[in-house]
Image (tube, rainbow, N blue to C red):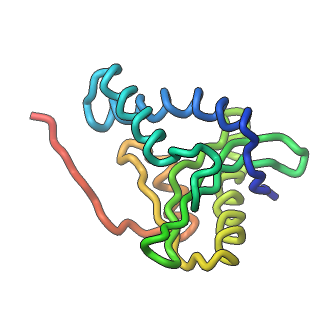
């Protein structure tokens, strides 16, 4: 069973150090940006989405902790104040040594249990098209595609 445990400030800065370059890599792959452009956009995205860090209203940034008290990943969601009942999952990752053990599915279930008492009735997310593993996970736990953006290199 996975528990969502709020990050500490030191957890948060370690998280940002790791996640910004990862997000930039996804941006380079999906949007064909240079490394510098992608890093700039990734930093800007986190700065705008979490301007007050962990204290940014409506956001919950957590560690994912298993029964052995190991941190197996992280999850960040935002409860949309302009759309009551809707929360947006910004980030979910299971660290490589812990993948393929059901932790991601458990994290999604734990998220629902965490968000429901806060009045959340709908969870939304974005996933890059090239991230087939994540897309399969989300379908497996009941998510449906609501919008598809496509591109072709010529």
| Front-most of residues 56 and 59 | 56
Residue displayed at 16% across by 42% down: 152
Q: Is residue 35 left or right of residue 18?
A: left
Q: In the shown orientation, is residue 19 left or right of residue 104?
A: left
- Give the residue at x 90% y 45%: 68
Q: Nearer the viewer, residue 152 or 41?
A: 41
- For the C terminus, the image quarter is top left
In front here: 78 or 104? 78
Residue 98 coordinates in the image, percent (x, y): 73, 39
Where 86 sits versus 42, above or below? Answer: below
Q: Position of residue 5 (x, y in %)?
A: 78, 52
Position of 150 compared to 65: left or right? Answer: left
Q: Residue at x 41, y 41 (%)?
A: 45
- Up the image or down, 113 lies above or below 73; here it is below
Q: In x, y percent, where is residue 70?
A: 84, 41
Q: Count of labels shown?
A: 0
- Location of the N terminus by quadrant is bottom right
Is 72 placed left or right of 88 in the picture? right
Q: Is residue 102 above or below residue 72?
A: below
View extreme (left): residue: 154
């Amino acid at each position: 069973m996975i528990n969502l445990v709020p990050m500490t400030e030191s957890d948060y800065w370690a998280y940002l150090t790791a996640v910004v370059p990862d997000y930039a890599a996804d941006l380079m792959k999906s949007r064909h940006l240079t490394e510098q452009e992608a890093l700039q956009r990734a930093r800007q995205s986190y700065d705008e989405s979490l301007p007050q860090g962990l204290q940014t209203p409506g956001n919950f940034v957590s560690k994912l902790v298993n029964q052995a008290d190991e941190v197996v990943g992280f999850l960040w969601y935002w409860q949309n104040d302009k759309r009551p009942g809707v929360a947006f999952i910004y980030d979910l990752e299971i660290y490589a040594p812990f993948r393929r053990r059901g932790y991601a599915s458990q994290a999604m279930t734990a998220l629902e249990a965490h968000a429901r008492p806060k009045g959340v009735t709908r969870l939304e997310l974005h996933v890059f098209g090239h991230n087939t593993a994540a897309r399969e996970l989300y379908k497996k736990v009941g998510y449906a595609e609501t919008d598809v953006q496509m591109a072709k290199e010529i």
